[in-house]
Structures are given as structure tokens and as C-alpha cells.
Amino acid sequence: MTEEEVSIVKVRNVLLVTIPSSPSDRTIDNLQDSILTGMKNVNPEGVILDISLVNIVDSFFARTIEETSEMISLMGGRTVIAGMQPAVAVTAMELGLNFGNVETALNVEKALDVLSGPGTEESSDQGEEVR
């Protein structure tokens, strides 16, 4: 994965989206399209947005994550944001963001546990690149 590239991989029946540390606005724009295409093509239980590499967010990035999470919900999926750094959490609060139905987890492993809870199907497909 290059510094600007977003990785989207199917793990279990979940899309795991790893966001680079300093994504450009173009990368963030493409992120939403890539995730929604993955939702359509894979029909996962949900999406994990791994932002553990991200140290700083601006309002555009935060708003896009919020909107994308809502779109995932409209398509029948759940969103878990994993690995939020303390500075990112502080910025999100300062920006007045309300992530609505988005769940959070300390890391990807815990996020997978959240999405693999009761009522979810576990798939044997692991590590399949989506795009």
C-alpha cells in the first residue's frame, strides 16, 4: 500500500478498509466510491474503517467518514471505526461530529469481534482483495 492508497480487503464477511496516515482530499473522495462499490459487489455484514494510521483529521475527512457510514447503513451494513488515535477523537469532538450508529473499537481485532457477534454469518473467504 502506498502512502496515498486505501486498502480494501474482505476478511470473514467484512470489508476491512485501511486508510493511509495522511490521505489527500482526492484519496478521501475515492474512498467513498470504493467502499460503496465493495458493499454492492461483496454484500458484507459491515465495514471496518481502520484509521489507526491517521493522526490528524480535517473537517472534510471527518464529514466524508460520517457520510460514508450513513451510506453503508442505508445499504444494510454496519460500520465500525477501529484504531482512533486520541488526537483524532479530540478533533472529532471539537468539530461536533456525531457518528450516529457507528460503532468504535480500539483495534481491528476487536472490530472483527463486534461484527462477528451473534446473528452474523462467518465466511471462509479471508484476505480477498476487493478492488
Image (tube, helix red, strand yellow):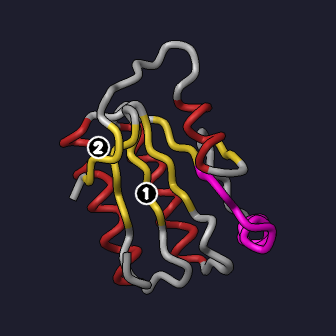
Residue 42 at x, y = what percent? 24, 39
First in sequence: mark 2 vs mark 1? 1
> Which residue is labeled 2 in the image?
39
Mark 2 → mark 1, Cα distance in angstroms: 12 Å
Look at the image and give the residue range highlighted in magenta.
81-95
Residue at far top of view: 119
Residue 37 has which mark?
none
Quick check: 13 left or right of 81?
Answer: left
Q: Is residue 108 magenta?
A: no
Residue 123 at x, y = what percent? 34, 25
Please report contact status of discs 2 and 1: CB closer than 8 Å, yes or no.
Answer: no
Between 30 and 12, which is closer to the camera in this rendering? Answer: 12
Residue 107 at x, y = what percent? 66, 51
Q: Is residue 84 above or below residue 1?
A: above
Between 53 and 87, which is closer to the camera in this rendering? Answer: 53
Quick check: 28 left or right of 65?
Answer: left
Residue depicted at 36% across the width and 67% down the height = 31
Overall secondary structure of the magenta section? helix
Residue depicted at 40% across the width and 18% down the height = 121
Residue flagged by tag 1: what amino acid is it?
A: Val
> Which residue is labeled 1 in the image?
17
